[in-house]
Amino acid sequence: MLLPALVLLVAFTHYPAVATIIDSFMSTPKPNRPSVFVGLDNYASMIEDPIFWQALRNNLWFALATIPLSVGLALAMALWVNGPMTGRGFLRMAYFTPTVLPMIAVANIWLFFYTPTYGLLEQIGGVFGLPSQNWLGDKSTALASITVVAVWKEAGFFMIFYLAALQGISPSLREAAAIEGAGRWFFFRRVLWPLLMPTTIFVLVNAVINAFRMVDHVVVMTRGGPDNATSLLLYHLYEVGFKYWDQGYAAAITVVLLGALATVALVQFFVLDKKAHY
Amino acid sequence: MSDPAFQQKSPVVDTLAAWLLAILWVLPLLYAVWTAFHPSEFSAKFSLFAPLTLENFERAWTAAPFARYFFNTTVLVAMILAAQLVLCTLAAYAFVRYEFRGKNILFALVLVQLMIMPDILLVENYKTMSKLGLIDTLLGIGLPYFASAFAIFLLRQTFKGIPKELVEAATMEGASSLQILCRVYVPLAKPVYVAFSLVSVSYHWNNFLWPLVVTNSVSSRPLTVGLQVFASTDQGIDWSIITAATLLTAAPLLAAFLLFQRQFVQSFMRAGIK
């Protein structure tokens, strides 16, 4: 009974993961020259590849910005939607809608938003007399622009988990706190936040994984440009693997990505799970 | 949850902030709807008297084989879901019902996929697909996702919660192992199946990078890839048409979401809490 599922899992998860590591020590096969063992050559070219470093840096910035922003917003959204707020139904729908849209569609919509001269941002800026700005074409704003899109897409998704957790918290806690005269902030910090800890960890782990996995919007909006300012690791991998067809080098980049994810997994397993009880 | 003491303390500032954020959140979508339903000269101009039109949708529909893309995506999503449900139900059942050696190690191996998704291994998986001759086929897009660690995990948790007495009663009645699965386990796990299905369908409807890599012709391209090809090459910069095509791509899921909002939100919740 287990067999079919296991065979497929091994074929498309474990085997490729191991094969990637092996391939990262091999040269890229050419039609008349089969792949040979080249030791650390692929890693050496990785270290010398400025685009790789830039993609790595971009990816770290992207992660550092999207994770706290989307998780923080998600928490705020959940607290609002869970409380006695006018129009809760509408709010919840508004926050969650981006989650069901394809990233490709989202990116196309935002692309139009950012377009110079006739995008919406430009028009709003124009009303206030701001100078024209090419958000995606300018190296200094491009990465921030795609970060905003990612946050917009993700926050509502994470909200759901917080909402579920909040609904599991007994209302009597809040009543008790109110009787004791605890302020809202105090109540949040001392009661809600600790109770929400397992959820926060779960959401954080997902946010980290997503930060290394989301590239659809890069493909649509910037193709890594301008001048690689928005190239993320997985996008660089895609370019190396399927535009330059350099399989050996692509394998080496994949290994870096796998390493990053394995680190997340180990941290979660050995550090975080001890602190949180599901 | 809405005790009066708290209600008083939920200040106007909060409500305002919440609404402001919500408006920010729907604005891009509303803008897209505006652009898609108006002639292109109004695509970035707001006027109450702008005439409504469906022309953008018609032009998008005829400019690219969207009908074929819709068909591909539908078949793909249905195929993946069916395979996932069958394979993962069997696997989860095996994990719950039988004792065998190395069970925990096997389960840990299954969980590896939660961290390392097929997306990241696309170079190796592409090689495997070309060995199997599955490049540019729907099966090729779907195959890496058939065995879902997430589904196995979710179903195993659910099956574990099903009372032993029910299973024992069924055994007394002489039900076979497979009958127990179909008559006892599966019906009781129905809400989880619904939840997983919604999550799976929306994930694969929206999936992009892997299908982009494995497909190279109209006959196997799903909607997302089709949209990208359409938006990047076929058009100049007629945003009205691109936006119309974009909405078209998202429409089925969006409509389903708006109609069954509660079900969607609860499904995503259920799938998230384990």
Image (cartoon, rainbow, N blue to C red):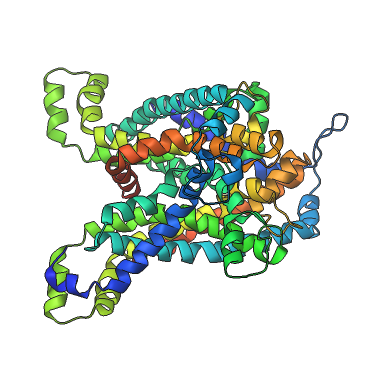
Q: Nearer the viewer, residue A152 or B138?
A: A152
Question: Going 37% across and 25% down the picture, which residue do you hit?
Answer: B86
Horizontal side of B113 relative to B127 (left or right) equals left
Question: Going 51% across and 44% down the picture, which residue do you hit?
Answer: B50
Q: Is residue A24 visible?
A: no
In the rendered image of this protein, does residue A117 appear above or below residue B274? below
Question: Going 57% across and 41% down the picture, which residue do you hit?
Answer: B119
**Residue furthest toward the right?**
A32
Q: Position of residue A19 (x, y in %)?
A: 65, 39
Q: Is residue A84 visible?
A: yes
Q: Position of residue B3 (x, y in %)?
A: 13, 67
Q: Residue B153 sits in which quadrant? A: top left
Horizontal side of B103 relative to A47 (left or right) equals left
**Residue furthest toward the bottom?**
A181
Q: Residue B41 sits in which quadrant? A: top right
Q: Nearer the viewer, residue B239 or B128?
A: B239
Q: How many marks?
A: 0
Q: Position of residue B217 (x, y in %)?
A: 67, 24
Quarter of the image with the N terminus of chain B in it: bottom left
Q: Position of residue B122 (x, y in %)?
A: 63, 39
